[in-house]
Image (cartoon, rainbow, N blue to C red):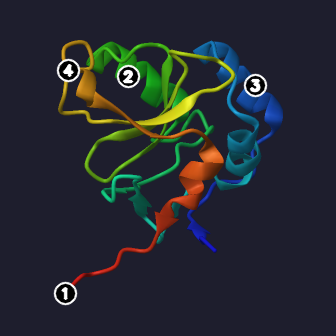
Amino acid sequence: MTRWRYTHQPVDVEVIKEIERQLGITFPDDYIEFSRNHHGGTTEDNVIKLDDGGELVFGWLFCFDEDKYINILEVNNDLREEHGIPKEIIAFADSPFGDYYCFDYRESRENLKIVFYDHELDPQEEPEAIEYICDSFTDFLSRLSPYEDDE
C-alpha cells in the first residue's frame, strides 16, 4: 500500500467545490475522496507504470490551500497564462522535472482521461506535449510503485 507523506490538513468539500467553480470543471469523485485527505502530499512510490512499459516519475499532489506554493488553482492559472494549456486540461500533480499530471476534459466532462503534460513542448504546436496515461484517478494511483534500480 502506498504511504503518503507531507499531506496537508483534510480539506472541506466546500473548498474543493469553490475551486471547481473557479476552474469551470467538476473533479472526479475518486479524486475528491482521495485528495481531501492527501492533498499537498507525496509518496515514496513515485514511479508511474505506463501501458507501453515506460515509466514516469511522480512529484507532488497539488493542494487546495490558497496560500501554499503548490496550490491547484494557482498552478492551473499559471499553466494557462504561461504555457497556453487549454482550459479543459487541469493539472492535479507534478513531476520532479517540471511536468504535470492532468485531467483531460476535452472529449468529455463525464469520462475524462488522465494525461501527462511535458512542459518543454508547446501544446499549441506539438500534440505530443499532452499524452494519455489512463482513464481514471483510481487507475492512476494503482500505477504508482517504488523505484527499482535495475543494476
- The amino acid type, in three-letter code, at marker 2 is Asp
Q: Look at mark 1 in the image and give the residue it sits on.
A: 151
Q: Residue at x 31, y 41 (%)?
A: 99
- The amino acid type, in three-letter code, at marker 3 is Lys
Q: Look at mark 3 in the image and give the residue it sits on.
A: 17
Q: Tell me if residue 55 comes above or below residue 146 in the rendering.
A: above
Q: Residue at x 44, y 19 (%)?
A: 77
Q: Look at mark 2 in the image and give the residue it sits on.
A: 78
Task: Provide the secondary structure element on which disc 4 rests.
Answer: loop
Q: Look at mark 4 in the image and give the residue it sits on.
A: 126
Disc 2 versus disc 1: distance between alpha carbons? 39 Å
Quarter holding residue 146:
bottom left
Q: Is residue 53 left or right of residue 92?
A: left
Q: Nearer the viewer, mark 4 or mark 3?
A: 4
Disc 4 versus disc 1: distance between alpha carbons? 35 Å
Q: Nearer the viewer, mark 2 or mark 4?
A: 4
